[in-house]
Image (spheres, rainbow, N blue to C red):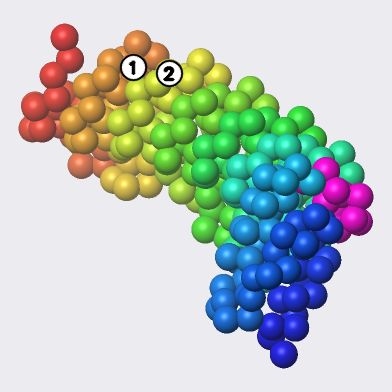
């Protein structure tokens, strides 16, 4: 039955010491296999046996539901020691996608796990792979406001000017009010005048509409075009006057 499948997964995934610890727990009533995986990896780290994961031979190719690999789970939960051990064993599936088209790097980037992101990039994970919705690692990290993770991604080769099915990274940062991220993107050659898909609005226009004066300052310092109008012909100055965005 289903409980038998769960038991098999536990037997394969969990190192012996952790299996002994959990031998008294009954998971047969759990309806979410993801909860089991979380518990398994968490306790593997706690009891200091994460290094056994690779030795057991499951490496990065053991698939959970939804197409997740062990590497994906460890990356999504932010376990750098586990990620490092798995990569030492094998990085052949480092860019494997789950059923939503997400890689381990994209998951870690969304969570803001800079150390995990760094490990994956050093192991040659591709930062430009997007999921089925078109979001890439840099996009999700910017959208969540993870400044340090954005810096790691940019240093690791993420292209801030790569055409996206979503908004340009600089526009996403302006919308979120992340002035430090705007500065980071600009320092890595991001086109600060790139226009978004909504009304052809630039990052500067978006920052004015959202009333983010620090973002406006950061964009002006990065030489953003203060005359760049949206598809309705409205400039940043007009939007600033409408929304009361003040920059000293």
Mark 1 to mark 2 CA distance (whole Å):
6 Å
223 w.r.t. 90: above or below:
above
Q: Quadrant of residue 61?
A: bottom right
182 w.r.t. 111: above or below:
above
Left-right relation of 13 to 3? right
141 w.r.t. 70: above or below:
above
Left-right relation of 81 to 107? right
Q: Which residue is mark 2?
A: 183
Disc 1: CA contacts within 10 A as few (<14), some (14-19) or many (>=20)? many
Please tell me whether residue 179 belongs to the stretch shown in magenta: no
Residue 163 in sight here: no
Measured as percent of width and height from the top left, residue 176 is found at: 33, 36
Cβ–Cβ below 8 Å for labels 1 and 2?
A: yes
147 w.r.t. 105: above or below:
above
Segment tinted magenta in the rendering = 50-59
Which of the image's four quarters has the C terminus?
Answer: top left
Which residue appears at 75% of the width and 83% of the height?
A: 4
Which residue appears at 77% of the width and 37% of the height?
A: 84
Q: Quadrant of residue 237?
A: top left
Q: Nearer the viewer, residue 128 or 95?
A: 95
Q: Quadrant of residue 229?
A: top left
- Secondary structure under the numbered disc 2 in the rendered image: helix
**Numbered mark located on residue 218 in the image:** 1
Disc 2: CA contacts within 10 A as few (<14), some (14-19) or many (>=20)? many
Residue 35 in sight here: yes
Which residue appears at 57% of the width and 37% of the height?
A: 113
Measured as percent of width and height from the top left, residue 13 is found at: 79, 62
- Secondary structure under the numbered disc 1 in the rendered image: helix
């Amino acid at each position: 039955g289903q409980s038998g499948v769960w038991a098999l997964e536990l037997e394969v995934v969990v190192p012996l010491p952790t299996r002994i610890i959990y031998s008294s727990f009954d998971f047969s009533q759990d309806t979410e296999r993801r909860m089991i995986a979380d518990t398994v990896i968490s306790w593997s780290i706690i009891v200091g046996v994460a290094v056994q994961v690779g030795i057991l031979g499951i490496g990065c190719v053991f698939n959970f539901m939804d197409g997740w690999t062990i590497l994906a789970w460890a990356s999504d939960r932010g376990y750098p020691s586990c990620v490092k051990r798995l990569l030492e064993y094998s990085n052949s599936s480092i860019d494997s996608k789950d059923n939503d088209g997400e890689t381990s790097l994209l998951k870690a980037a969304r969570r803001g796990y800079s150390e995990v992101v760094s490990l994956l990039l050093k192991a040659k994970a591709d930062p430009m792979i997007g999921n089925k919705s078109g979001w890439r690692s840099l996009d999700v990290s910017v959208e969540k406001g993870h400044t340090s993770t954005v810096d790691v991604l940019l240093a690791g080769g993420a292209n801030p000017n790569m055409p996206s099915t979503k908004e340009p990274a600089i526009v996403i940062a302006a919308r979120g009010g992340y002035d430090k991220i705007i500065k980071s993107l600009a320092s890595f050659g991001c086109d600060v005048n790139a226009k978004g898909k909504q009304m052809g609005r630039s990052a500067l226009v978006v920052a004015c509409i959202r009333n983010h004066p620090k973002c406006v300052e950061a964009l002006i310092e990065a030489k953003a075009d203060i005359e760049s109008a949206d598809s309705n012909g409205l400039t940043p100055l007009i939007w600033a006057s409408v929304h009361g965005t003040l920059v000293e």
